[in-house]
Amino acid sequence: MGVCLKVFVVANTKGGVGKSTVACNLAVNFSIKDRNVLLVDTDIQESSISFRAMREKDDIKSISIKTPTIHKDIKSFKNFDIVVIDAGGRDNGVLRSAILSAAYGVIIVPTLPSVYDLWATEDTLKIIQDARVYQKIKSYILINQVIKANIVKETKEALNELIVKYEMKLLNASIFSRVVYRNSIKEGKGAIEMADKKAKEEMEQLTTELSDITNIN
């Protein structure tokens, strides 16, 4: 391998927060950087698997795992540099197994910048807290689908409360709500492969920040 295996788990029990979009874009960005990438889909909707099927380039491998064995299986993926796991849906053994596998890298919890979404995201943070009894897990919140640059005071307060309560960290990178993200996914492409300069910069910033956190050269 070019680098030691790194695992990026993108998880939230709440739907509509952009888990698959983030996971697929990370897979593309790392692949473009000449990493050998495996995209793992644990969701019954199989959004990431569908993305891979749409993608013309044969640069990303993908599999579906719907059994609570991911944290055990992860060692068998030693032929890959990067494993990106799209984990969502209800709280079950599969989700908890995916979260445990983040011990080999980091977990990213996408959430929308609203108080209601943050409250709903707390369920996922509780599961991560449970997993920390068994594994040391680097855990980060990603603010996704931002509409305005300024997040309202109430949202900031709710976010800070969750960060402190569950010992999370907030990623410096944030992703704005852009049509290009939806369009690119439909084409089996990452935002970096589209013409939208701002979307490219956002995903590059996210990938660089996560690479720094996990010590990827």
Image (cartoon, rainbow, N blue to C red):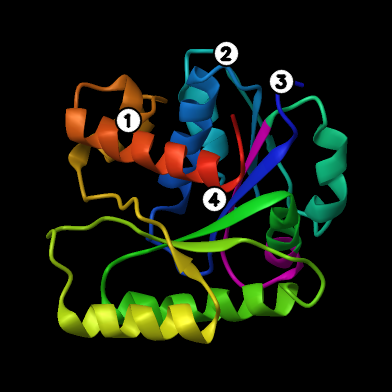
Badge nearest the viewer, 1 or 2: 1
Badge nearest the viewer, 4 or 3: 3
Residue pointed to by mark 3: 2
Tell me what residue is drawn at x 50 percent, y 13 percent: 57
Whether the residues at callouts 2 and 3 have beta carbons within 8 Å, the answer is: no
Q: CA distance from mark 4 to mark 3?
A: 32 Å
Percent across and percent down for residue 129 are 65, 78
Crowding at mark 3 (Cα within 10 Å: few <14, some 14-19, many 20+): few
Which of the marked residues, 1 or 4, is nearer the chain's N terminus? 4
- Extent of the magenta region: 82-96
The dot on residue 58 is: 2
125 inside magenta stretch? no
Whether the residues at callouts 2 and 4 have beta carbons within 8 Å, the answer is: no
Q: Say which element carries label 2.
A: loop
Amino acid at circle 2: Asp
Residue pointed to by mark 4: 45
